[in-house]
Amino acid sequence: MKTSIATVSISGSLVEKLHACADAGFDGVEIFEPDLIASDHSPEEIRGLARRLGLSLDLYQPLRDIEGVDEATFTENLRRAAATFATAQRLGIGTVLVCSNVATATVDSVEHSAEQLRRLGDVAARYDVKVAFEALAWGRFVDDYRRAWRIVELADHPSVGVCLDSFHVLSRRHDPAAIEDIPADKIFYLQLADAPALSMDVLSWSRHHRLFPGEGDFDLATFVAHVLKTGFDGPLSLEVFNDTFRQTDPDRTAVHALRSLVWLKDKVADLPGVGRGASLTPVADAKPPVGFDFVELKAEDTSDVEILLEQLGFVPSGRHRTKPVSLWTSGDVRIVLNEHQARDLDPHVAAVGLQVPDADATSRRAADLMAPAAYRRTYAAEQALGGAVAPDGTEFFWVTAPPAGSPPPWVAEFENGLPPASDGLLRQVDHVNLAVPWQTSDEAVLFLTSVFGLSADAPTEVAGPSGLVRSQVMRTDDGSIRLPLNVAPQVLETADMPQHVAFACTDVVAVARAARARGLRFLAVPDNYYDYVAGRFGVDADTVAELRELDLLYDRSPDGTFVHFYTRTVGSVFFEFVQRVGDYDGYGTDNAPVRLAAQRVRSTG
């Protein structure tokens, strides 16, 4: 099935957009009229450029406020439409999008609108152009695709059909099942966009907050399945109005967009009654990760991190035999410290290792989804890891999960170390919190969803000293992988937003006492916080005193309790130790403002 994208979905001039779409691998594009108007290239030159780039020009849009008007207004509208059709003809485009009237409609009648669309079809036919009529979600009288189809059905003109747009259907919570009642040859075009679930006027929602498939809350796979069951075989086309994508690099955004369609086609093919075929190119199937394998911190000098790890009970378990890389362990938890090619870099989370059921399958899936490969120099006697680079630059690697109790094979490459520490207190990596730039946060969600099969929790906002921090957790269903993505307030650079690695403990109080005995400096928690804990949760005085003594934080939900502490920040990374009691499944979100304020006090002296 062909892929297409509206030029409004990415930044740049029209020529730059066409090059970006072609380089990414799209089959075609929709030309957004303002892009052509602002271009210094004639329609014929754009047509020729698209042909040289191997792009079809699939749609010219939009033609607004045509039907549902009085005769005098409609006469002027036909003149305006003829000029648009002439431009489409010069571009070599055979379909023009006509939106339902939002501004000048005065006649609320499907028969009246149908009669005017029939006459519009007569004009379109003279230019060898077809009209795809779309019900805008904020249309004055036509805001439902079912009403738009009824109007087209009554118009009964070979040059008049419908355009189905997922945003306009799903934002109004209209049931898409009736799409299957529309004959395939009357569905002239299909436009797709995802979006977050927001409570706001639908026009603003549409103009500023659309997303690529896989990044929002719409069930696009089911929507597309309804369309395909009609026999529709036109392109899957993206029309995404989004303030971020209009500012970011068009080449990167175009690849990001195409990845979303590849993912969507794969999801559609898995639905009952659809199936895979030539129109839905399969993506390699790979099961989600089953656990963390390692976390890598990179810096020119990792000695400060080594001191911190030693205070936390980790031991040095070897030096890599060919690279300036060391391994620190506690039980089955592995932290890799990398000083290779790290000049002028402060400590930061550079890579996350995952254990997956089948590493080769994950590698094939990542390649099918155009995930950029992560390169590491590997010698003959060393294990090559599958890897991809996330949108924020963090590298993700994966290995096939070894048998229970056995380390992965790559651990043997580290020599002359101590046996792993094992006091039974440290269980596993609980979560890795990554700071992502605002302009790649949506792309990061798609990357983790599509490549690794993670799901996105609802985003939350945390108040910090420098503004709101937006956080969204990507995770497996069983919680074995949790990756909170934090977007810093725009007044901060992403580098000023620390990352952290959280470890799950069986007894966080014992871990804290042992770490303090080894000289660990905890992140200081203000006394006011403990007064708040005592009042809010009714915690007894002895427990509050213990929390206060060890700078521990506390949270409770109906499912259980959560106790945790933070270390000081080294470079841009710090550690957290957590104990989940019962079925507590959160992250102590209400404690985050306390942590952010304490970190700001330390950073400002």
Image: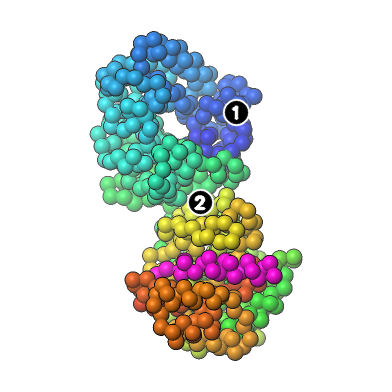
As helix, strand or loop, the secondary structure at mark 2 comes to: helix
Q: Residues within 10 Å of mark 1 (few under 14, many from 20)?
A: some
Do the residues under discs 1 and 2 have CB atoms within 8 angstroms?
A: no
In the rendered image, residue 235, in percent from the top left (x then y), is placed at 42, 35
Residue found 63% across the figure and 24% down from its top: 41
The quarter of the rendered structure image containing the N terminus is top left
Asked if the stretch drawn in magenta spans residue 595, the answer is: yes
Q: Residue at label 2? A: 442
The amino acid at mark 2 is Asp
The span shown in magenta is: 584-605
The amino acid at mark 1 is Leu
Between 358 and 602, the one nearer to me in the picture: 602
In the image, residue 414 sits, relative to residue 7, either above or below, namely: below
Residue 49's label in the rendered image is: 1
Asked if the stretch drawn in magenta spans residue 200, the answer is: no
The quarter of the rendered structure image containing the C terminus is bottom right
Between 244 and 157, the one nearer to me in the picture: 244
- Using the numbered discs, state the Cα–Cα distance from disc 1 to disc 2 in whole angstroms: 31 Å
Quadrant for residue 300, please give it: bottom right
Is residue 268 something that shows in the picture? no
Residue found 41% across the figure and 39% down from its top: 201
Quadrant for residue 53, please give it: top right
Which residue is farthest right?
Answer: 344
